[in-house]
Image (tube, grey):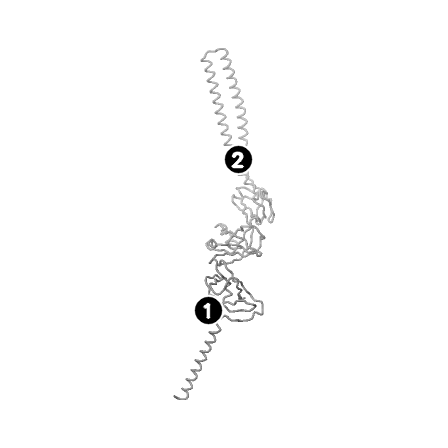
Amino acid sequence: MSYWNRLGVKCAVVCLMVLLLSGCEKKEQSVPVLSESAGTQLETAVVTRGALFEMSTYDGKVFPELKEITFGAEGTVAEVKVALGDTVKKGETLFLLKNEGLEEELASLKKQLRDSEVNKYYELEIQKLELEIQKLTLKQKQEEKAPAIEIAQIQANYDRQKLLLEQYIKVKDFDEKKLQVKIEELEKSLNSFQITAPVDGKVVYLKETHLSMPVKEGDIALYLADYSGLYIQSEYLEEALVEKTEMVYALIKGREYPLEYDPYTVEELLRMKDSTTGMGSRFRFKESGDYASGDYGCICLKNKVENNVLSIPKTALNSDGEETFVYLVIDGSLVKQVVKTGAETSIQVEIKDGLKEGDVVYVKG
């Protein structure tokens, strides 16, 4: 064997020995040992036992309930009693409308009813008088012992007249009742010409109107902000996503408030789409609290993944490609600890082996 061949073999043997020795050193360092000193403030987490949750969060803002006030009938504007930005009380008059045709018809019907009642009164008095005369005549003939046929004729006339009076009263009562129903219907319609506030609130939109301006039934008159009915709105979320969520709450000023999903109607969504605010999803507060219109909060959708498991933040996990481990915080120092993981969410991971409840682990910042 030549010199160069013998030299190559020697180099190969030396390299192999170096590799073997390196492998031995790495194998020895894989056991938990003191890794580094924690001379500075450490971010840590405690190993806890409980439910493992998957959670997604969305920015939200608190808004007052908007009450859409529409004109209740067709007519013309008689008076506008509010201005944009006014605060109003429930029952306060906002608009007055008029409809001369309906007002004239109502006046005519009321006159007919009054005339009918007067005519009925006089007719009844006349009929009662005639009946009384016939009754006295019958009594007189009976005392005079007039022929039976004559007495029977007077009695028949009396009975017929009494029956006609009863029928007259029924017909007049029926006619007057019909008139009264028509009057009530018209008065109800005319009541729609007085637009009142359904709740306490603030006028945030007012239709531009002027006196004698014609309006149609159902036209929007104004919007009231009802600050007693607050809700929180996020970006638009798929209804299926929200409905399958186990727990929905808002985090406002450090406090959690349970929420209930209140989907917008198709009409509301279309109005939002055409507006500058864009589409969103609405959630109702289930309880009162320290929040107000204009407050910002975080809407949290939370789903349970596992029950009664040990878990830590995912940011506490480390891996060297062969094993997964954490750093236990012991007496101010970090000690490597191999762990076995299970179910995980976007922020938590289940620990099946290697840690116990109450252990403190280092969390990467």
- What separation in Å lies between label 1 and label 2 (alpha carbons)? 85 Å
Give the residue at the far bottom of this rendering.
Answer: 2
Q: How many marks?
A: 2
Residue on which the image places disc 2? 184
Quick one: 308 or 181, which is closer to the camera? 308
Q: Amino acid at mark 2?
A: Glu
Quick one: 235 or 79, which is closer to the camera? 235
- Which label sits in the foreground, 1 or 2? 1
Label 1: which secondary element: loop
Q: Where 116 sits versus 36, above or below?
A: above
Neighbour class for label 1 at 10 Å: few (<14), some, many (≥20)? Answer: few
Residue on which the image places disc 1? 323
Instruction: Give yes or no for contact between labels 1 and 2 (Cβ–Cβ under 8 Å).
Output: no
Give the residue at the far left of this rendering.
Answer: 1
Place of residue 216 in the rendered image (x, y in percent of width and height, measured from the top left): 52, 44
Point out the image quarter for the C terminus.
Answer: bottom right
Q: Which mark is drawn over residue 313? A: none
Q: Amino acid at mark 1?
A: Glu
Label 2: which secondary element: helix
- Position of 41 with respect to 340 (left or right) is right
Lower sequence index among marks 1 and 2: 2
* Residue 199 appears in the rendering: yes
Place of residue 132 in the rendered image (x, y in percent of width and height, measured from the top left): 52, 18
Point out the image quarter for the N terminus.
Answer: bottom left
For the point 53% across and 35% down, the residue is: 184
* Residue 211 appears in the rendering: no
Quick one: 149 or 344, which is closer to the camera? 344
Quick one: 150 or 210, which is closer to the camera? 150
Place of residue 140 in the rendered image (x, y in percent of width and height, measured from the top left): 51, 13
Place of residue 188 in the rendered image (x, y in percent of width and height, measured from the top left): 53, 38
